[in-house]
Image (spheres, helix red, strand yellow):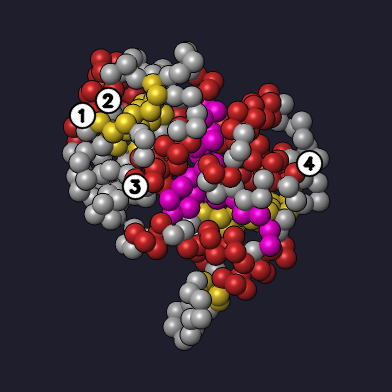
C-alpha cells in the first residue's frame, strides 16, 4: 500500500480486517517489520486516540516514532506560486520534502476549516503532502475522511455482529459545536464495501455529500431508521449543504436508552469518541452493557497496526 487516506487505497478489505484480527491475537507477531524505520506523526489538530493508538501500533512493529504538534510549528503556505509576504513562513513544498528526510512514513491529522467547502473537499493539506513528500502518507483524520477510525469500526462490527449481514444505522445527534463530516463520510464509505445493511438518519439539511451517499438509504425519521438496527453509530456533524453551519440542536435526536431498547433491536452503541455526554447520548447508553465504545477505541491500535504493516511492505 502506498498511501492510506481513504477506502479507495484498500483493495482487499477482508484481508486487511483479518490481518488486524491476527495482530490483535498476537500484537508482537511482526515486531521487526518496522525495524530501523521511523514514523513521523504531524498533528495540525488535537487527538487522544489516534495519536496514542498509531504510536502504539508503530512501536509494536518495531518502528521509531516522532509525534509533533504541527499547529505549533510554522504556518504553512499551500498555494502554488504564492508571494509569501503575509502570515505563512514556509511552503508545503519544502516542509513535506524535509519531513520526508526524517520519516519513512508520515501520518497527518488535519481538520477542515468548515468555511470553504470546495477547499476542504479538495483535501488541500493531505493532497499537498502526497504530492511533495517522498514518504507514504497515512491520514490520521483529514478534512473529509477518517479511514483509520473506519477500519477499526469495520473490525468492531465484525467482532460483535450476531448475523452475517447486520443492520447498521448512522445517526446524526445534536452538539454544541460545528463538527466535521469526516467521520460519518468515512464510515459510510467503508460500510458500503462491508457486508452490512446501512441506513443514515439525519434531520433535513444535514445530508452528507452525494459522493458518499450515492446508493445509501437516507431516512429522515430517526425512529423508522432505528427499527431492527443491530448497531447504532452516533455522530454529530455540521451541514454540508449550508456548509459548516449548525442548523439544529434538536434534543429529540439525542440517543437515549429508550430508543436503543424500544426502537432498535437492543442494538450495540458505537461512537468514535470524544463524545459529549447527555448532549449526543445519555449516560444510561454509554454506561450500559450495549455500549462498545471502549472496545471500538481499543481496536484503533490493531487497525493502525495492520495499515502500517501494509504500508511498510510497500516501501
Ligand atoms: N477524531 C474524532 C472526532 C474529532 C472531531 N470531534 C471533535 O472535535 C469534538 C470536539 C468537541 O466535542 O468539542 C470530529 O467530530 O471530527
Ligand atoms: N476517534 C478519534 O479519532 O479520536 P481522537 O480525535 O482523540 O484521535
Q: Under tag 3, what secondary structure?
A: loop
Is mark 1 in CB contact (under 8 Å) with mark 2? yes
The label nearer to you, 2 versus 3, is 3
Q: Residues within 10 Å of mark 4 (few under 14, many from 20)?
A: some
Q: Horizontal and vertical percent for residue 58?
A: 69, 44
Q: Which residue has dot 2 on it? A: 225
Give the magenta range.
134-156
Disc 3 to disc 1, C-alpha distance? 19 Å
Is mark 2 in CB contact (under 8 Å) with mark 4? no
Disc 2 to disc 4, C-alpha distance? 44 Å
Is mark 2 in CB contact (under 8 Å) with mark 3? no
Q: Is residue 145 left or right of residue 8?
A: left
The label nearer to you, 4 versus 1, is 1
Q: Which residue has dot 4 on it? A: 33
Q: Earlier in the sequence, mark 3 or mark 1?
A: 3
Q: Which residue has dot 1 on it? A: 221
Disc 2 to disc 3, C-alpha distance? 19 Å
Question: Can residue 153 be seen?
Answer: no
Amino acid at each position: 500500500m502506498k498511501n492510506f487516506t481513504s477506502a479507495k487505497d484498500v483493495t482487499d478489505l477482508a484481508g486487511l480486517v483479518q490481518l488486524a484480527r491476527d495482530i490483535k491475537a498476537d500484537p508482537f507477531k511482526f515486531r521487526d517489520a518496522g525495524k530501523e524505520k521511523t514514523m513521523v506523526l504531524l498533528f495540525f489538530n488535537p487527538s487522544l486516540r489516534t495519536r496514542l493508538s498509531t504510536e502504539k501500533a508503530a512501536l509494536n512493529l518495531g518502528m521509531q516514532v516522532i509525534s509533533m504538534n504541527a499547529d505549533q510549528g510554522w504556518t504553512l503556505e499551500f498555494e502554488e506560486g504564492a508571494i509569501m509576504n503575509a502570515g505563512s513562513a514556509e511552503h508545503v513544498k519544502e516542509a513535506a520534502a524535509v519531513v520526508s528526510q526524517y520519516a519513512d512514513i508520515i501520518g497527518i491529522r488535519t481538520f477542515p476549516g468548515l468555511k470553504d467547502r470546495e477547499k476542504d473537499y479538495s483535501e488541500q493539506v493531505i493532497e499537498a503532502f502526497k504530492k511533495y513528500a517522498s514518504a507514504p502518507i497515512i491520514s490520521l483524520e483529514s478534512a473529509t475522511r477518517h479511514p483509520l477510525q473506519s477500519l477499526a469500526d469495520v473490525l468492531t462490527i465484525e467482532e460483535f455482529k450476531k448475523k452475517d449481514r447486520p443492520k447498521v444505522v448512522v445517526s446524526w445527534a445534536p452538539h454544541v459545536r460545528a463538527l466535521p463530516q469526516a467521520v460519518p463520510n468515512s464510515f459510510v464509505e467503508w460500510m458500503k464495501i462491508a457486508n452490512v445493511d446501512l441506513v443514515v438518519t439525519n434531520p433535513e439539511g444535514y445530508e452528507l455529500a452525494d459522493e458518499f451517499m450515492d446508493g445509501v438509504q437516507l431516512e429522515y425519521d430517526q425512529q423508522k431508521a432505528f427499527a431492527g438496527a443491530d448497531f447504532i453509530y452516533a455522530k454529530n456533524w455540521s451541514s454540508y449543504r449550508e456548509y459548516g453551519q449548525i442548523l439544529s440542536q434538536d434534543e429529540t435526536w439525542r440517543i437515549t436508552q429508550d430508543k436503543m431498547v424500544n426502537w432498535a433491536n437492543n442494538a450495540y452503541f458505537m461512537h468514535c469518541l470524544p463524545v459529549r455526554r447527555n448532549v449526543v447520548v445519555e449516560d444510561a447508553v454509554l454506561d450500559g452493557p450495549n455500549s462498545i465504545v471502549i472496545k471500538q477505541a481499543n481496536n484503533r491500535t490493531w487497525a493502525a497496526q495492520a495499515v502500517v504493516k501494509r504500508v511498510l511492505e510497500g516501501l
